[in-house]
Image: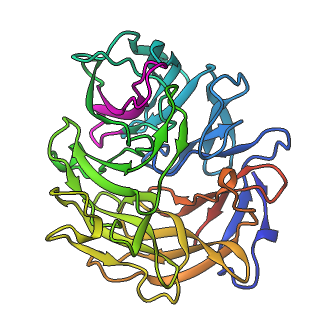
Amino acid sequence: MLPRPDLCDDRTPAGVEVFQLTTDPEAPCSHIYMEAQIFTPDSARFLLHYHGNPHWSDRADPRHRYLLCDAADGTMSELIAETGAIAPSVTPDGRSVYYFVDEAAPGGGRITLKRVNLDGTGRETVMVVDRPLPGTRFRPSKLYSLSTISSDGTRLAISCFLGDGVHEGAPFGLLVFNLARAEVNLVMSGPTWCNMHPQYCRARDPEAAHDILIQENHGSRCGADGEIHTLVSGLGADIHVIRDDGMDFRNMPWGRDGREFCQGHQCWIGRETRAITSTFTEPEQACRLIAGEAAPFLDHTGSATADAVRGDLSRDIPRPRFFHFATDIAGRRLITDTFDPAGGSCLYLADLPADGAPLRAFTYLLHTGTRAQKGAHAHPFLSPDGRLGLFNSDESGTLQAYLVRLP
């Protein structure tokens, strides 16, 4: 763990410390996208990509690894090294991690769900999917790079492609695995669910723990092989919540009104049933953070959804320019990257009131130094206890992972 005080400046608060976690100039490394459950609940350890970036990793690259990092001193150990490994989720008890080995191709191959203890012992195969999904003619392939685990640790969800590699217009789907029974079900599907970003609600309430936040990209087009040719964000993107049994499809009250557009990044607020999205709004060309609660689905009406509860968390900030963000598990602290015209990609920290009031104690942390191209987004997030911030940057010339100790 390399101290990087040079990434702080005269606006950085006293007590903030910055460290570069990975330093191999020949290997792009990064944090796993902040939607995933990659921290142990005590905030002591977390997973990292080696030979990967925040958006993807080459499943055919034998150099790709998932490393387990100690948050106290930065020491790392290799935890997952199989070629094709993808989409890890640390269990809520912090003892083990589930992940997939993707050896599927459209219409064939296999997907293996595995589990391993965080000390590297007890590696086992939970189940293999090498035939059509129950009750369907579809075989899954092209797994999404992130999985999501329920707050009780009994279910795991991931999205996938369902085409056969021949026919155009094939659907994408949401798979839910029952981990105790080693069963999988396809709970929803359609051709415009190509960038679903599924995220289990982290609430411990037995009902809310079945809710999954998902993204639809209306108008997107994919080839018969599942490759996305046109990914429609903006007016085409809207966000929903669905139960993991495929029932109770609902709207999140964001975007789709011709003035407010979803950027395509969203997350739950800690263990609450509220969530946040980032938007682009016209005519002021601001990028805002909007909180909201799921409302009954009548149509894809976004922010015009009837009886919706929503609020602009960034309404007290002049011309906000927010992109990626995350909260601690208590839902009281938020970290975000923002575009500062005077300094490029910067990180800010804020307090998140429980009553829907706007962000408070909005505080500059540092300049990330990243060029902010898609493969090198900072993608900041917090440890569960909110004491550590993590981000990515290519300021060294190669994408690397960084850690910030917060006062």
Is 159 magenta? The answer is yes
In the rendered image, residue 35, in percent from the top left (x then y), is placed at: 45, 50
Residue ID at (30%, 24%): 179
Residue ID at (65%, 54%): 374
Foreground pick, 364 / 185: 185
Residue ID at (59%, 22%): 84
In magenta, the rendered stretch is: 149-177
In the rendered image, residue 242, in percent from the top left (x then y), is placed at: 23, 46
Residue ID at (77%, 55%): 394
Q: Is residue 290 above or below residue 98?
A: below
- Left or right position of 325 against 329: right
Foreground pick, 53 / 78: 53
Q: Is residue 185 above or below residue 76?
A: above
Q: Is residue 293 above or below residue 188?
A: below
Q: Is residue 354 above or below residue 159?
A: below
Residue 106 appears in view: yes
- Left or right position of 238 against 373: left
Write down the quadrant of residue 119 in the picture: top right
In the rendered image, residue 396, in percent from the top left (x then y), is placed at: 83, 56
Write down the quadrant of residue 344 in the picture: bottom right
Foreground pick, 243 / 115: 243
Is 382 magenta? The answer is no
